[in-house]
Amino acid sequence: MTNIILRGCNGKMGQVITEMVDADDNVVIVAGIDISLERINKYPVYQSFSQCNVKADVIIDFSSPKGVEEMLQFAIERGVGIVLCTTGFTKEQLQLIEEASYRIPILKSANMSMGINLISKLIKEAARILSEADFDIEIVERHHNRKVDAPSGTALALADAMNEALSNQFNYKYDRSTERVQRDKKEIGISAVRGGTIVGEHEVIFAGTDEVIEIKHIAYSKAIFAKGAVQAAKFLPSQPAGFYQMSDMIG
């Protein structure tokens, strides 16, 4: 049995995870952390880690970068791993997370979907092969109209995966309206669409001469992210201190 502390338990994703864990006999949420205490849960909920003295195997964080320092300190003191699903960290916070990974296992991913992380592995190989054949690379991501950041963290993670495979020789192009110039061969275009209730779509386009290859992922509900987070929570407690990604879990 894996005992979980869920940070952001009363948010939308927190409640999806709560429902998923309820249906899984191999995991249990032993405590929640959330600034809001309005919702009633089956487990105790605290507004901060300083108030929490519950023993656990792992923390799932689906909240915000605010307060990450307190969570890291709590986890280090108790030797608890963290599944870090939050994005938007500052450089200073990312440095703290990296330093913490020397002492506890931390799995960090911009997107917890198993499908997205499998695609990330596939597009690395595709980028290596197709860039040599002069294929252009573009990413188009679509999300609901309430998402404030653009491009999405997942789009950037996909671009980073391909760029790493290409020895980081490519630049990212986010907006073509400011310049009237021909497309650079050493660039990855990233476009963002915001509208309606789109949960999340990411499309990687490899455009060559007279042929196009598209690899696309569509999320129809937030449940896929919750599932990935729970799977990661099962995986992490048995791992030594270190910095992990979803690719480490799916092999």
Image (spheres, helix red, strand yellow):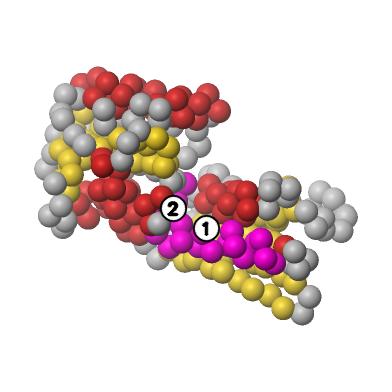
Q: Is residue 195 visible?
A: no
- x and y percent of residue 160 in the render? 60, 48
Above or below, comparing residue 240 to residue 117 in the picture:
above
Q: Is residue 126 visible?
A: yes
Q: Is residue 55 left or right of residue 209?
A: left
**Most extreme residue toward the right, as rendered?**
181
Q: Can you tell which mark lies on residue 154?
A: none
Callout 1 crowding tier (Cα within 10 Å): few <14, some 14–19, many ≥20? many
Q: Secondary structure at mark 1?
A: helix
Residue 148 within the segment the image draws in magenta: no
Which region shows up in magenta? 110-130
Residue appearing at x 73%, y 50% in the figure: 170
The quadrant where residue 202 appears: bottom right
The quadrant where residue 210 appears: bottom right
Task: Choose the circle earlier in sequence order: 1 or 2.
Answer: 1
Residue appearing at x 41%, y 50% in the figure: 248
Callout 2 crowding tier (Cα within 10 Å): few <14, some 14–19, many ≥20? few
Residue 118 within the segment the image draws in magenta: yes
Position of the C terminus by quadrant = bottom left
Above or below, comparing residue 206 to residue 227 in the picture:
below
Q: Which residue position holds label 1?
A: 120
Q: Nearer the viewer, residue 161 or 62?
A: 161
The amino acid on which the numbered mark 2 sits, given as a three-letter code, is Ser
Residue appearing at x 75%, y 64% in the figure: 132
What is the chief secondary structure element of the magenta stretch? helix
The amino acid on which the numbered mark 1 sits, given as a three-letter code, is Ser
Q: Nearer the viewer, residue 245 or 177?
A: 245
**Mark 1–mark 2 CB contact (< 8 Å):** yes
- x and y percent of residue 163 in the render? 65, 51
Q: Which residue position holds label 2?
A: 247
Residue appearing at x 17%, y 40% in the figure: 3
